Image (cartoon, grey):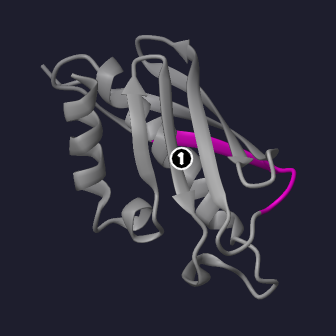
Amino acid sequence: MTTDLVRSLNEFARNKHPGLVGVEIETCEPDLVTGRMVVGQEVVAGNNMVWAPVIITLADWLCAAGMSPNLPKGAGFTTIELKSNFLGTAAVGETVTGRATPVHKGKTTHVWDAVIRNETKDKTIALFRCTQMILHPRT
């Protein structure tokens, strides 16, 4: 199941923002999502370091992907809050990875945390939290 889900998520995102900046989901389970990207020239800011919104994209996409195996049948979701703390950065050619886990899985909301790391330098570079609202089908 997880292989098909990962393939489906990566295919979905290929021509959308996460795919366009190079994010790839590696695993997607109900309580853990992992992914990575290699920092390319096209995603660096004027200081030659990865642009902060790109790191947010990685974290947010991992948390959003984690909703897939957790949603009730027919339900959707939307992000209602997100927060990022940056502790470091990454340069062109460095690999950035993320690990997202749920903190709360309720009937109407989920809260997910993601830790983003510069794997090349073995350093945590961002902490991320988002709250997702589950959109149940109307009856």
**Residue 139 in the figure: left or right of residue 26:** left
Looking at the image, the residue that sits furthest to the bottom is 46
Q: x and y percent of residue 132 in the render?
A: 48, 32
Quarter the N terminus occupies? top left
Quarter the C terminus occupies? top left
Q: Quadrant of residue 69?
A: top left
Task: Name the residue nearer the viewer: 130 or 107.
Answer: 130
**Residue 19 in the figure: left or right of residue 129:** left
Dominant secondary structure of the residues highlighted in magenta in the image: strand
The vertical placement of 41 against 50, above or below, is below
In the rendered image, residue 83 lying in the magenta stretch gets the answer: yes
Q: Quadrant of residue 114?
A: top right
**Residue 72 in the figure: left or right of residue 36:** left
The vertical placement of 65 against 41, above or below, is above
Q: Residue at x 67, y 79 (%)?
A: 44
In the rendered image, residue 13 lying in the magenta stretch gets the answer: no
The vertical placement of 106 against 9, above or below, is above
Q: Give the number of callouts.
A: 1
Q: x and y percent of residue 78 in the render?
A: 41, 40
Q: Residue at x 44, y 30 (%)?
A: 133
Q: Quadrant of residue 104?
A: top right
Q: Which residues are magenta?
A: 79-89
SS class of the residue under badge 1? helix
Q: x and y percent of residue 56 in the render?
A: 62, 55
Q: Residue at x 64, y 54 (%)?
A: 96
Q: Residue at x 60, y 42 (%)?
A: 98
Looking at the image, the residue that sits furthest to the right is 87
**Residue 138 in the figure: left or right of residue 104:** left
Near mark 1 (Cα within 10 A), the count class, few <14, some 14-19 or many ≥20, is many
Amino acid type shown at disc 1: Asp
Q: x and y percent of residue 39 in the render?
A: 61, 69
Residue at which label 1 appears:
60
